[in-house]
Image (tube, rainbow, N blue to C red):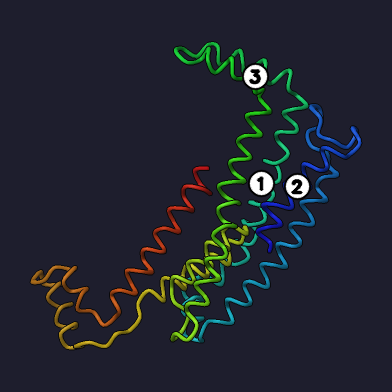
Amino acid sequence: RHAAVVWVVLPVLSCSWEALAPSGYRASCEEGFSNCTLALIFLVLVHQVRAEIAAWTTIKSLLADPELVVMRQFGVLRSRVRLVLVGMFETYVLFTDLQFPFVARACDEILTEDWHHTWRQVPVFGEFVANQVMIVRFWGFALIAIALVLLLNGGLGLVCMPFAAEDVKAATGLDGIPGDVYVGWARAAETAMMPSVASLCEEMAAQRRYIVDYKDTKTATKAREEVIFGKLDAKTAAALEDYNQDVAAHVLCAENAHFVMFLLFKVFV
């Protein structure tokens, strides 16, 4: 729900404000975006804190006491406050990004001319880009950039959220919540600007990667010793360990996909 507030409601309200507010309360070249629009981000941040508390409490209630001890030892619980603040700053940065095209439009004559002049000095393709700048204008490029951010970060994240719910239904009846479900929750938390919840889910996914699958314990112990003395390679020894290899590979694949999406859409974009 909060992800929809961030990626749908906030952009719609920002555009509506600039379209319907009196001219004195819109973005200007001299003062930037109107201070009145800070009320929008304040309401979103209040909603974010409430949603984070609900999500954190729900996820934490699913953990057993030994798992809570592990989370505490790894510092996941201790880092919650810091990550909540990071999530709030991320939301505020998105808000300023949404306001930037409107401020750029108010300063269109200055910014577009300067940008056009700069591109004309670039060899080979500078003249072509300079011509496009005069057509699209500087604020138009800024609008395209923020639209891509909304589409890739928000749109794809919102589309993936229903799949996390389907994974939960598929896991009904199993012994505990599988690691790939926690990965899906982590992806949803990142979309909702809740890195604290995402961190908790990511660490739980790592913990659930190894499901005990009792084999020949004596052979597994001997294989570990032979790896130390160089008599056996690590890959062969891993195949003899007392955990489900298929589950571990499936969770690891889900984690890798999650981190690749995180790097592409939240870091590079």
Q: Is residue 217 above or below residue 45?
A: below
Q: Which mark is residue 184?
A: none
Regarding mark 1 in the picture, which secondary structure is present there?
helix
Amino acid of disc 2: Val
Q: On the rendered image, what quadrant is the N terminus found in?
A: bottom right
Q: Nearer the viewer, residue 168 or 124?
A: 168
User: Which tag, 2 or 3, sits closer to the chain's start?
Assistant: 2
Residue, x 67% and y 22% (percent of image)? 137
Residue 141: horizontal and vertical position, in percent? 62, 29
Q: Quadrant of residue 143?
A: top right
Q: Is residue 29 left or right of residue 217?
A: right
Q: Which residue is mark 2?
A: 12
Amino acid of disc 1: Leu
Residue 106: horizontal and vertical position, in percent? 78, 27
Point out the frontmost of discs 2 and 1: 2
Q: Which residue is mark 1?
A: 94
Q: Marks 1 and 2: in contact by CB < 8 Å?
A: no
Regarding mark 3 in the picture, which secondary structure is present there?
helix
Regarding mark 2 in the picture, which secondary structure is present there?
helix
Q: CA distance from mark 2 to mark 1?
A: 13 Å
Residue 217: horizontal and vertical position, in percent? 21, 88
Q: Which residue is mark 3?
A: 135
Q: Nearer the viewer, residue 21 or 79?
A: 21
Q: Nearer the viewer, residue 130 or 217?
A: 130
Residue, x 34% and y 74% (percent of image)? 247
Q: Is residue 186 left or right of residue 10?
A: left
Q: CA distance from mark 3 to mark 1?
A: 26 Å
Amino acid of disc 3: Ile
